[in-house]
Amino acid sequence: MSTLEEADVASAAAALKNCFGLGGDFTVAVEEPREDAGGTIRPPIGTIICAGEPVWSILLAQWSPVLSNLINAKVVIRDFSAPAVEAFLRFVYSGIVRGPLFTLVELSAMADKYQVEQLHALCIKAVRNGLRAENACELLACADRFRADALRLEALRKIFICAEEALRERPAVCPKLLEEILESGLVCIGRKKFLSILEGWGTGRKRKDSSAEADSLQPVISRKITQLQNGVYSEPWHSGDVLGDAWKDYEAIEHENKLPFLGVYVNMMLSPDNYLFLANNTGPLDRYARNEKAFRITKGWITWRVPYYSVYVTGFTFSSDVPAGVRFQLYGASDRAQWHLILDSEKVAIKCSQTVAVNCPVRELKAFRLQVLHGDFYNQFCIRGIVRQVTDVPLPQVV
């Protein structure tokens, strides 16, 4: 006899959600950590500020293998706040993540500690979806406090790229973080506008916090103002196609005797075992130098060097899907001595609409290398990142 089945999982989930706080066999209590005047997290002082709701240990154990080994009559959590713990327990019953940005960043750290992978992924997704230029500084401070490195990096990049919006008001961050932002050399804004923003932070109209802690930011701000007033400044910009933008710079030069693009603005080099490149790819090489045309490579590597620019790489995009059977690696270098691995496809399919985010250990790159290890790479890729002209090497224009 065949077995018949119908399901209403949503109703079951809703019923379980409504059971939160209605009973259980143990209690979660919270002793909140405290923060001193300098922003340092200190151990709790021993006062239980949230007795918590009774919960069922068997349910919690299904989500967290770590907590399953700690459960007894009472669990006391000392390194996370009461709102984060409550949000954690509500997720256990409902599978739903809800809360302000600060709580969700803290919740992601809690999920990571207690190995609740689904909750951690949902928190990261929610925070990323909610990231805006206007709240990027708040996210940076939260992520730095809870050591959420991935979110910290995304917040920094949002501040760098959308600097005018992100820094419109004096950010509520510690001096160390403000210095990291201002001294990065990656804030995408012109000198005059940068100065206007920093000088505006000193007025009551722009100040969000007039406390002594906010005043500790003033030396960092004053030092940057002096640098902008007296030093050489190369304005960074965000590029979705570094090689293509180098070509646009070249086209903007109006002179009949201007130097060639390939060999001056962008250099290309093929590996000795890549002798089939010219046979497999028709057209002049400068079309590949300026990222105008897709190319085929089945073995070896290609190097692009941009001697008059430095690039802080944030990711790559591809003009067509990369099949799972193709494995390639992308490297970056700031000089000719050492290459750093930026991306390894590891035979994982990549969609053409997907931006592959990367985190390169070196911020200022001048060369990129594509190496194909397996399969037929036929594609066109864009280097995304923050670009600056190298101030000590003037951009050549004419012969």
Image (tube, grey):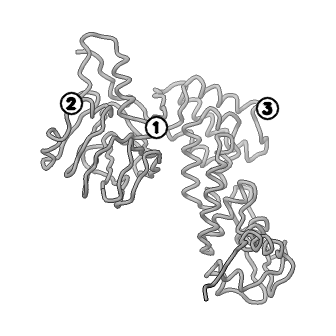
Q: Where is residue 267 drawn, in percent x and y? A: 24, 34
Apparent side of residue 311 relative to residue 287 in the rendered image (left or right)? right
Residue type marked 3: Gly
Apparent side of residue 208 relative to residue 149 in the rendered image (left or right)? right
State the residue position of label 2.
283
Using the image, tell me which numbered label, if any, was put on residue 386: 1
Task: Work out whether 16 lies above or below 233.
Answer: below
Q: Residue at x 36, y 33 (%)?
A: 309
Is the residue marked by circle 1 packed among few (<14), some (14-19), or many (20+) residues within 10 Å?
Answer: many
Is the residue marked by circle 2 packed among few (<14), some (14-19), or many (20+) residues within 10 Å?
Answer: few
When asked about the image quadrant of residue 311, the answer is top left
Q: Please count the marks in the image.
A: 3
Quadrant location of the N terminus in the rendered image: bottom right
Mark 2 or 3, closer to the camera? 2
State the residue position of label 3.
204
The residues tagged by marks 2 and 3 sit, at their Cα atoms, a distance apart of 60 Å
